[in-house]
Amino acid sequence: MKLVLFFTRGLSLRNWDRKGIFDREVAIYQMLQNRGVNISFVTYGGSSDFNYVDRIPGINILCNRWKLPRILYELFLHRLHAPALKECNVIKTNQTNGADVAAKAARYWDKPLIVRCGYMWSYFAAKNFGNDSGRARRARQIESRVFSTAQRVVVTTSSMKTDVCERIPEACSKTAVIPNYVDTINFSQDTTKDRDIDVIFIGRFEHQKNIKALLEAVESLNVQTVLIGSGKLENQLKQRFASLNNNLHWVRNVPNSELPDYINRARLFILPSHYEGHPKVFIEAMSCGATVIGADSPGIREIINHGKNGWLCGTGSESIRAAIIHLLNNPGLCSKLGKNARKYALEHFALDRILKMEEKVLKSVMDENSMGQVK
């Protein structure tokens, strides 16, 4: 089988590397490769993406080596990468943003298309820019078009599938739920680590993540807080909470493989977001057996069974503060939540389990395509 994966619009292997997520993102494709699947990556990077050949041996890198403006690259991509697209069996997207480019290639070369989305693009666009904004309308239009014509739609949560079924009924029967995966070997509990961090957050410094409320929550507490990431609110937040410098530590993006060290040093892992898709770093923290606090928000509440495998709080600073104080004062409860979180991650998000689900979808698409050709 030959699979061509289309990257999210505008992204490259270099982007993945700079964000520290390279190894995490390629893991499942390397496993598929070991199962005999020939993999090609269609990226938006330039020739610098070829620098990653040694890190993903055997995976064919198809990038913008012609240095074309992105609009032209998108327009002619289906011809520029003709040899790989002509010979492949299945085309797949990594996210919905850019799925229209993949759909055009699939139509041109008469290939089955799997549209995968880790979060609902239109929902995020509506939250960020307004429901009637041009970006939200465009996202809904592309989703409607590509979900309707794709052979399979893959979403990460059942609530996302419900949304697809309500908005695009013709796509409902061909929509599968495959959660994000975790490398549960790398992301595992290490009891030898000193718990020198009280509260840790990992993610983008953007409004969605609700970091201001988190910092307001710890402002009156004597707790060691670590924020790992970067984003457009970084400077603003550093200025606003400069008084916390003795207790607040900012860490720039670190490779995904190094996150378990930080998570295992923390008493509490928190994600206070206003909304999420299916947050990878959150389930990675659960896999480490961390005591996780999540806002009672879309994308988080579907993962946490309050008081069983984690703790839910509101998005306001007072609710976040109350959750932190309660858990720091109840180590026995924290131990129980951490053990159950690890068990939940193993049962639902382990890489081997998700690999089987991916293989099942690929096989079903291949089988359907073969039957169509026979007819």
Image (cartoon, rainbow, N blue to C red):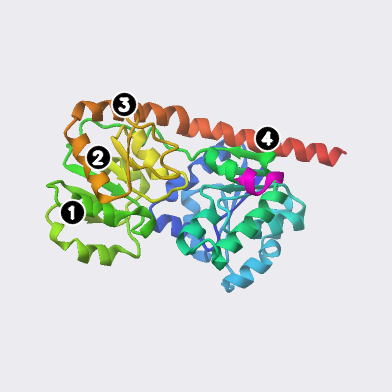
Disc number for residue 248? 1
Disc number for residue 323? 2
Q: Residue 362, located in which quarter of the rendered image? A: top right
Q: Is residue 82 above or below residue 200?
A: below
Local packing at callout 1 (Cα closer than 10 Å; few below 14, some 14-19, many 20+) is many
Front one among 310 and 69: 310
Choose mark 4 or mark 3, whichever is in front: 3
Disc number for residue 363? 4
| 79 on left or right of 329 | right
Choose mark 1 or mark 4, whichever is in front: 1
- Tag 3: residue type? Lys
Mark 1 or mark 3, which is nearer the start of the sequence?
1
- Tag 1: residue type? Leu
Q: Position of residue 235 (x, y in %)?
A: 27, 67
Q: Would residue 233 be seen by someone viewing this image from the given angle?
A: yes
* Quarter of the figure that contains the C terminus: top right
* Quarter of the figure that contains the N terminus: top right
| 237 on left or right of 6 | left
Given the current orientation, which residue lies at the most extreme bottom position?
69
Mark 2 or mark 4, which is nearer the start of the sequence?
2
Mark 2 or mark 3, which is nearer the start of the sequence?
2
Q: Give how far apart the Cα atoms at labels 1 and 4 are.
A: 49 Å
Q: Position of residue 279 (x, y in %)?
A: 42, 45
Disc number for residue 339? 3
* Range drawn in magenta: 164-170
